[in-house]
Amino acid sequence: MFVVTSKQMYKAECSAVERGTSFLQLMENAGQACAKLIKKHFAIDKTNSKNVLVICGKGKNGGDGFVIARAMWEYGCNVTVMLACGEPKAADAIEMFSLVEAAGIDVVRYNNNLTLLRPLLDTADIIVEAVFGTGFSGSLDHSLSVLAQAVNSAKSKVVSIDVPAGADCDKASVQGAAFKADMTIAISAYKPIHVIKPYNQLCGRLAVADIGITNNDFKKADSVLCFTLDAKDIRSMLPKRKPVSNKGTYGHALCVCGSMRMTGAAYLAVSGALRTGAGLVTAAFPQSAYPAIAPKLTEPLLLPLESNFEGTFAFSAMADINEAAKRANAMLIGCGIGFNKDTTTLVHNIIKDAKKPMIIDADGINALSTNIDILKEAQAPIILTPHPGEMSRLCGRSVADIISNPVAIAHDFAKKYGVTVVLKTANTVVCSPDSNGIYINTTGNPGLARGGSGDLLAGMTVSLVAQGMPPFNAAVCAVYLHGLAADTVAERTSMRGMLPSDVLNILPELFSKFE
């Protein structure tokens, strides 16, 4: 499902109009499609009619509301329209309002005094909120803030059309009061407010109304679009296990991870690669960490390498890593390797020499940040998996700036350096260096906010790349599944108490739903 800005949505609508429809017809399509979704969701029929209050603004979103009111009236519901901001002003909305009046549907005006209107709120089974659409920014005025608070405190079910009033569609933010929906019906596609945390919670359950705008209309609006995926999409992307196959069929992942002080990073990354289906996994780690790492890793091939006095990889391990990389289909470097002169030089040389796709995480990113232009010397595809602090070191922007603008910053970096970027935030963003699009992840929870979660994700990613998936697709699938596994653990136990190893251990069961 595409995630589009208000500007992209308008351009897509214009494209549909150029194909022969009209803005008025699009409004009719939107209202009718929303009404059908409401009818289905609340099981409305002749024996189960509802009291419906439709609160309309004076623009095009209000126009959609007028169409919904007429359709719900035709379904046999007892419908009242409330004009929240005065008489409609948009030409299409004025025409749709005239049809409401012609049908004899009750219309009331909100005049900043809820005393007379309170019975409507108290008796409504469903309140349809169609006050503002995608163009709203800023904050609700006092009058609408009072109305929003009254609606939010009512016992009625609230359905917002496209965007809950008070929420900024594109910034996915709220200043002051806002309507809180039990269900939000997105027109044609998701908007940022629908998916980006934390204010996506205002939207409640999401549904999408098809109004006749096609994927091509959206693609004409912008060559690079944001999108989300669901479990069905991920299932179709994952490599299939073949009836006749062997370990070589599913790729060989090389994980260059760990140090004497960070043995868990190696364990989680390597185990994540194994659990995600790679046929062979080689765990390369410093010799000094062997007593701690080896007993925990019984399934992979072990490659202990020369270490320095700090217990990290010595630069002299480079030759053995290069040899191991020749036998692998993909490699991961960085999880828990430490940050010093040896590891920094090692990472730089691997980036220049590697002929296989590479995932760079954690201390690998820290090493890269000392000479970011070395990415231009890479001979193979690279996936970077930074959290905001690491991204700050890579691009020189503040952490606050990155958190507030993750999509734009990740996308700009991916294009500039020709790499796939997995920016790990509340909504992890995956950006490709070309026109594949920008993926915004919707799985995961705050239980992942602890050390080790990123190591597991990196291991899952290298496993999928080793199995033959293109880097962007592999990153998208790994991010989705990593978050979904965490959601499963949180449902069964808790976010506070969950550990990365809990997420790791649930993967076999989770994958049973994708085979």
Image (cartoon, rainbow, N blue to C red):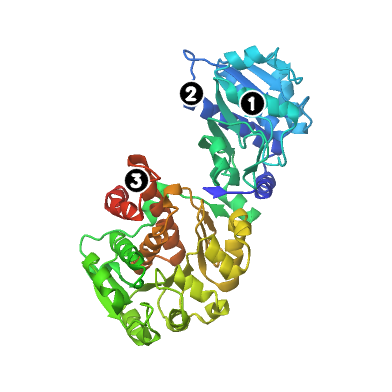
Q: Residue 329: horizontal and vertical position, in percent?
A: 34, 74
Local crowd size for mark 1, using a 10 Å CA cut-off: few (<14), some (14–19), many (≥20): some
> Foreground: 130 or 297?
297
Q: Is residue 112 left or right of residue 71?
A: right
Which residue is tagged 3?
A: 489
* Mark 2 or mark 3: whose residue is earlier in sequence: 2
Residue 515 visible? The answer is: no
Residue 293 sits in quarter: bottom left
Up-down: is 67 above or below 326? above
Up-down: is 400 above or below 171? below
Q: Which residue: 69% across, 25% down?
A: 146
The span from disc 2 to disc 1 (Cα, nearest Å) is 23 Å
Q: Residue 103: horizontal and vertical position, in percent?
A: 68, 16
Amino acid found under the numbered disc labelled 1: Gln
Amino acid found under the numbered disc labelled 2: Phe
**Secondary structure of residue under mark 3:** helix
Which residue is tagged 1?
A: 149
Q: Nearer the viewer, mark 2 or mark 1?
A: 1
The span from disc 2 to disc 3 (Cα, nearest Å) is 31 Å
* Mark 2 or mark 1: whose residue is earlier in sequence: 2
> Foreground: 343 or 154?
343
Up-down: is 194 above or below 295? above
**Secondary structure of residue under mark 1:** helix
Q: Is residue 267 left or right of residue 438?
A: left
Local crowd size for mark 3, using a 10 Å CA cut-off: few (<14), some (14–19), many (≥20): many
Residue 13 sits in quarter: top right
- The residue at the far front in this view is 309
* Mark 3 or mark 1: whose residue is earlier in sequence: 1
Q: Are marks 3 and 1 in contact (CB under 8 Å)?
A: no
Residue 58 sits in quarter: top right
Q: Residue 374: horizontal and vertical position, in percent?
A: 54, 80
Which residue is tagged 2?
A: 42
